[in-house]
């Protein structure tokens, strides 16, 4: 599973772009939804990392 920090960083970038109201192919609402997905992926990666560490 990917590093949780990378997902958390991507979520932060998407939220900041949505707050700035950047124009482009993606609406602010879409960026927020993508940030939510990235945050969930970060959580899953962190839990996976912790479970692997405790199962040893």
Image (tube, rainbow, N blue to C red):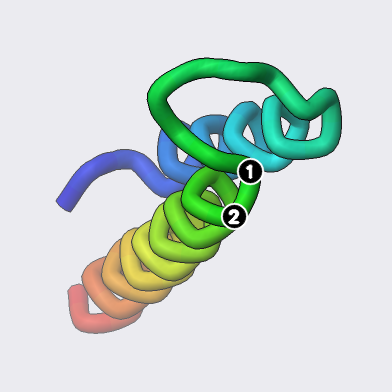
Q: x, y (%) of residue 51? A: 30, 79
Residue located 63% across and 43% down the image: 28
Secondary element under disc 1, as helix, strand or loop, is: helix
Q: x, y (%) of residue 47? A: 39, 74
Residue located 45% across and 33% down the image: 26
Q: Nearer the viewer, residue 3 or 35?
A: 35
How many C-alpha atoms fall within 10 Å of the one at disc 2: few (<14), some, or many (≥20)? few
Kindly give the residue lying farthest to the right in the view shown.
20
The residue to which callout 2 is attached is 29
Residue located 28% across and 70% down the image: 48
Residue located 48% across and 51% down the image: 30
- Looking at the image, do the residues carrying marks 1 and 2 touch, with CB atoms under 8 Å apart? yes
Q: Nearer the viewer, residue 25 or 48?
A: 25
How many C-alpha atoms fall within 10 Å of the one at disc 1: few (<14), some, or many (≥20)? many
Q: Within the image, what quadrant is residue 16 found in?
A: top right
The residue to which callout 1 is attached is 28
């Amino acid at each position: 599973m990917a590093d949780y920090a990378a997902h958390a960083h991507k979520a932060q970038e998407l939220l900041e772009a949505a707050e700035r109201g950047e124009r482009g192919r993606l609406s602010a609402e879409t960026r927020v939804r993508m940030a939510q997905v990235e945050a969930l992926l970060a959580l899953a990666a962190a839990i996976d990392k912790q479970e692997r560490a405790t199962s040893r």
